[in-house]
Amino acid sequence: MIRLRRSASAAALTLTAVAATLLGFAGPAAAHVTVNPKEATQGSYGRFAFRVPNESDTASTVKVEVTLPENAPVGSVSTMPVPGWTVAVEKRKVDPPIEVHGSQLTEAVAKLTWTAAADAGVKPGQFQEFPVSMGPLPQVDTMVFKTLQTYSDGNVSRWIEEPVPGAEEPEDPAPVLTLAAAAPSPSAAPAAGATAGNGDDDDSDGAVTALGVAGLLAGLAGLVLGGLAFARTRREPTPKS
């Protein structure tokens, strides 16, 4: 009995250790930097937030660098103020130019860098969002925003790994925005329907015209018959008294 109890206790401790190990691996993987919302439409404008959780138990996040993809430049990028943080905007040349509302833009935002003031960093157990407005969104399936997260102790988390279709999520994934194609413009079907409706109207007009002609002919026939009757009356001799 003692051996059985010792075996059971050993097995329980082993399972606990395994579970703790698995949870330890699962925790950090779920706390990476993300962009929210994660889906949008090509050609549209939207408000997005880069959500940055603090994974350190002792240090604060003091700087966040987000690089916009070179293969998908965006014409308009603006940031929302974050209390205690300053933002630096770095631009780059684009060729061919980006057309936005009829204007040709030769520059696009390349990188956004947020830096915390004293004691304004993201503390352990907290997260911070950095809102951005972007548009028109490019004609691509995904936008990958490679991000560097710097801690107050000098450590840097590099969220730069791009996802691979069909593969597991990478250990240090970059934030990814999925873009759906815009809905197609209305087809010519309504115009065809309108044409069909005009055809019905033509048929109705034709029927009305036919009835009008029939009525006119009936009226003329009545006049002819009346005239014949009048003429016959005049030809008949008046009876003598």
Image (cartoon, rainbow, N blue to C red):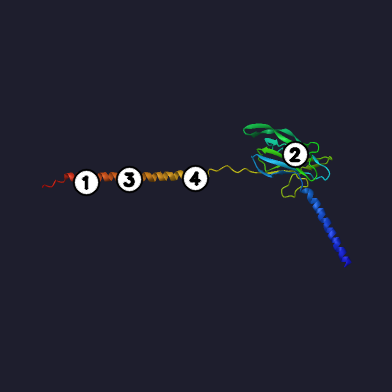
Q: Quadrant of residue 135?
A: top right
Residue under the point 24% across and 45% down: 226
Residue denoted by label 4: 193
Specify which label sits upstream in the sequence, 4 or 2: 2
**Does the CB distance between marks 1 and 4 fall below 8 Å?**
no
Percent of width and height locating residue 225: 24, 46
Q: Which amino acid does label 3 sit on?
A: Gly
* In this view, the mark in front (3 or 4): 3
Q: Are marks 3 and 2 in contact (CB under 8 Å)?
A: no
SS class, disc 1: helix
Write down the residue under mark 2.
66
Quickly name the residue at label 3.
Answer: 215
Q: How far apart are marks 3 and 4 (CA)?
A: 33 Å
Q: For the residues marked 1 and 4, what is the alpha-carbon distance in whole angstroms?
A: 54 Å
Question: Farthest residue toward the right?
Answer: 2
Rounded to the nearest angstrom, the CA distance separating label 1 from label 3 is 21 Å
Q: Is residue 106 left or right of residue 237?
A: right
Residue type, label 1: Ala
Which element type, helix, strand or loop, lies under badge 3? helix
Residue at numbered disc 1:
229
Crowding near the residue tagged with mark 2, few <14, some 14–19, many ≥20 C-alpha atoms within 10 Å:
many
Q: Do the residues labelled 3 and 4 touch (CB within 8 Å)?
A: no
Q: In this view, does 18 lie above or below 89?
A: below
Task: Find the distance from the CA under tag 4 to the CA under tag 2.
Answer: 51 Å
Give neighbour class at mark 1: few <14, some 14-19, many 20+ (Cα, 10 Å): few
